[in-house]
Amino acid sequence: MPSFSRSKKMNSSVFISCSLDQFSVSYTRKMALTNLILTIVGVTACVMVLRSDVKHSATIFRRNIKHVRNWLEEESSAAAKEMEKAKPKEIPKNDSLKDGKE
């Protein structure tokens, strides 16, 4: 009878060892699949966030360019008006230059 109980223990330990091997392979595959899925989800989330951030930044940049363009147009028109208002400086006439004398 002791031999029967030993063989039963031996058989159960072999069964347990086989099932543990299968479990570890199955567990490893499941973990690999889970890691792959989490990586894909993480990368996708980063791409979406960066994409929306780039779109937002581009919108702000375009708006700033419009403001700068308007400022430049206002300043150039103001400068043109100032030039029209300003009197030209008189250049002193030098009679010696007309005669060819220095």
Image (cartoon, rainbow, N blue to C red):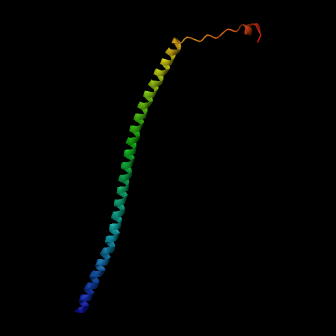
Residue 75 as seen in the image, left or right of residue 31: right
Q: Position of residue 75 (x, y in %)?
A: 48, 21
Residue in front for this viewpoint, 80 or 51: 80
Q: Which quadrant, please, contains the N terminus?
A: bottom left
Quadrant in the picture for residue 98: top right
The answer to whether residue 67 is above or below residue 54 is above
Residue at image point 29% right, 78% down:
15
Residue 97 as seen in the image, left or right of residue 2: right
Q: Position of residue 66 (x, y in %)?
A: 43, 28
Residue at image point 36% right, 62% down:
32
Residue at image point 41% right, 40% down:
54
The answer to whether residue 11 is above or below residue 93 is below
Residue at image point 38% right, 49% down:
46
Q: Position of residue 43 (x, y in %)?
A: 39, 51
Quadrant in the picture for residue 34: bottom left
The answer to whether residue 97 is above or below residue 72 is above
Residue in front for this viewpoint, 88 or 8: 88
The answer to whether residue 51 is above or below residue 83 is below
Residue in front for this viewpoint, 73 or 40: 73
